[in-house]
Amino acid sequence: YAALVEGSVDKDSSAGVISHAIGKVWVDDHNEWACDLHDDASFAFIRHNGSSDTTTFVPDSLRDATTLYKAVDWGTVQTNGHSKSVTRVELTPVTGRGHQLRLHMASMRHPIVGDYMHGDKGTINKEEQLCLHASQLSMDSFCFASNDGENASLQRCRIVIESTPPF
């Protein structure tokens, strides 16, 4: 995945691993995904701006979650007449939890641009889009080994689709 995150990721820690379990917390009248920052189910992180006022996870909802990240470019964007720092990062989910990439980046104080759920209310407005993009999707499938009609046999093949991020 490619993402544009708010702030300047420190170049000394521009690559690493984020490992915080993810689970559900009850907020008002619904569940929301949250990140276990202390690794003991004592504090549920939901939003970058510190407005997480709940500390109780729904029983048995916590699951391990790991994301690899690498900062690849640093820059600025203009928003509302102000210049704000942004960093382009490559994200690789090792596990596949709901909101994992969004929560893990926000837990580092670098919410994904346009993430109004886990970022600040004053998040950078990048034409109101979430700047998170699957740059490559791949899957195993079966393909015909030849186009020879009746001699064609099925074999396992890997399909890879690549896409350039629009931001």
Image (cartoon, rainbow, N blue to C red):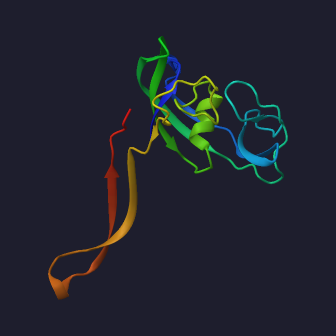
In the image, 105: left or right of 133?
A: right
In the image, 73: left or right of 82?
A: left
Which residue is nearer to you in this view: 38 or 104?
Answer: 104
Residue at (77%, 31%) from the top-left corner? 52
Task: From the top left corner, tell me how far across and down residue 163 is, in percent.
Answer: 33, 45
Image quarter of the N terminus:
top left
16 to 154, vertically: above or below: above
70 to 7, vertically: above or below: below
- Tell me where residue 152 sits by quadrant: bottom left
114 to 163, vertically: above or below: above
Q: Residue reaching furthest top?
A: 82
9 to 116, vertically: above or below: above
- Tell me where residue 158 sits by quadrant: bottom left
In the image, 31: left or right of 139?
A: right
Tell me how many marks there are. Answer: 0
Task: From the top left corner, tell me how far across and down residue 81 is, in percent.
Answer: 47, 11
